[in-house]
């Protein structure tokens, strides 16, 4: 069942007039430039990216700057600084970035670096590789002048100690541990860029890497077709190569909404009788070459921020399956 989108609320000083608009097909409207990001904290990230883009920065610098806002914000509990740790109380970060030429860079299982997206960008630009992981990623970051710092805030440590009392790994959907920021940007030339950054699922096993640094899973784009990115339980997204599949469906002519919905249906079929069904949430955002976009999730509660000239910067409730 597809439910209609409605615009929930708007932000933000500098960009947005307040708007409340009823059900419509606004997400089918083509326009560019346009930036879409997962979750409510995507509003602030969009605002920064938009500011950069419209003052002359290129697409890749604009999305990097945008998602860095979430990485630095300790109130965003599953990205960068302030992100919830793994079972051992250690914050480990995953991030990736991709540009219009299909250049991409990624870091996984990175520790003590506040802006993994910037390290991912340098992996893309300054190495012959796509992904660096763990100590190698950290060494690379240090060689590029990044400074080590603790990312575990007092609040996150408190939450972890609290969690440890029961040590029950049962993610709470849509809050705390499902707030990866994924951002997709189409610029004034209709070129596409994408970024994704997270501290991953809270209370994950130490060493666990999710979908977010995996090109094709957490993020994918093809500049001839469109871009897609994911949030939610990474294992489910990896199993279906989620973002790559959404883009491939758009290549076949599906709308962004239909493409996202098809992959969410597939994830639902695979997991329906599995042990993680109860807490499973996945959401996708997608944008095509015309700037048409959509967000769609398995369960109710996923929202995403859309920034363009017409709508300013709005938080949209995604359509959902259940
Ligand atoms: C992960 N996909 O590590 C990430 C978590 C997430 O919104 O998206 N949270 O599985």
Image: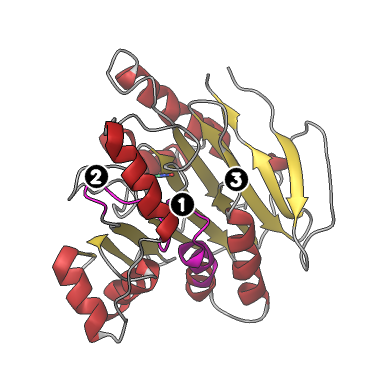
Query: In this view, which residue lies farthest toward the left?
Result: 136
Q: How many marks?
A: 3
Describe the element under mark 3 as helix, strand or loop.
Answer: strand
Q: Residues within 10 Å of mark 3 (few under 14, many from 20)?
A: many
Q: Secondary structure at mark 1?
A: loop
Residue 125 or residue 274, whichever sits in front: 274
Quadrant occupied by the N terminus: top right
Q: Which residue is mark 3?
A: 304
- Magenta highlight on residue 135: no
Question: Mark 2 falls on what kind of element?
Answer: loop
Image quadrant assignment for residue 256: top right
Inter-mark Cα distance, 2 to 1: 15 Å
Residue carrying label 1: 77
Q: Quick check: 260 above or below 222?
A: above
* Circles 2, 3 touching at the beta carbon (< 8 Å): no
Picture coordinates of residue 86 (x, y %)? Answer: 27, 48
Q: Which mark is residue 87?
A: 2
Q: Is most of the magenta stretch helix, strand or loop?
A: loop
- On the image, the x and y values in percent for residue 293 come to 60, 45
Q: Which residues are magenta?
A: 65-89
Q: Earlier in the sequence, mark 1 or mark 3?
A: 1
Residue at the image position 78 percent from the left and 31 percent from the top:
23
Q: CA distance from mark 2 to mark 3?
A: 29 Å
Q: Nearer the viewer, mark 2 or mark 3?
A: 2
Q: In the image, residue 248 lies at what x, y percent?
A: 40, 41
Q: Quadrant of ligand 1?
A: top left
């Amino acid at each position: 069942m597809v439910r209609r989108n409605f615009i929930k609320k708007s932000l933000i000083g500098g960009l947005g007039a307040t708007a409340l608009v009823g059900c419509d097909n606004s997400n089918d409207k083509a326009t560019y430039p346009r930036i879409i990001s997962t979750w409510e904290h995507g509003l602030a990230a969009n605002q920064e990216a938009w500011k950069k883009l419209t003052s002359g920065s290129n697409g890749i610098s604009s999305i990097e700057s945008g998602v860095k806002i979430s990485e630095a914000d300790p109130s965003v509990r599953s990205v960068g600084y302030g992100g919830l740790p793994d079972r051992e109380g250690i914050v480990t970060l995953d991030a990736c970035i991709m540009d219009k030429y299909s250049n991409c860079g990624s870091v996984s299982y990175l520790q003590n670096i506040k802006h993994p997206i910037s390290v991912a960008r340098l992996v893309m630009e300054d190495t012959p590789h796509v992904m660096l992981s763990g100590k190698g990623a950290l060494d690379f970051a240090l060689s590029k002048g990044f400074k080590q710092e603790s990312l575990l805030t007092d609040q996150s440590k408190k939450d972890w100690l609290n969690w440890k009392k029961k040590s029950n790994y049962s993610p709470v959907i849509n809050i705390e541990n499902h707030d990866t920021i994924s951002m997709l940007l189409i610029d004034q030339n209709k070129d596409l860029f994408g970024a994704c950054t997270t501290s991953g699922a809270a209370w994950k096993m130490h060493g666990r890497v999710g979908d977010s640094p995996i090109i094709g899973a957490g993020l994918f784009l093809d500049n001839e077709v469109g871009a897609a990115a994911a949030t939610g339980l990474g294992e489910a997204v990896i199993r279906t190569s989620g973002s790559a599949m959404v883009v491939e469906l758009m290549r076949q002519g599906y709308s962004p909404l239909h493409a996202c919905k098809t992959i969410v249906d597939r994830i639902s079929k695979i997991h329906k009788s599995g042990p993680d069904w109860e807490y499973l949430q996945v959401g996708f955002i997608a944008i095509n070459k015309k700037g048409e976009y959509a967000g769609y999730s398995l369960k109710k509660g996923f929202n995403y921020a859309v920034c363009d000239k017409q709508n300013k910067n709005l938080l949209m409730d995604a359509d959902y399956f259940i």
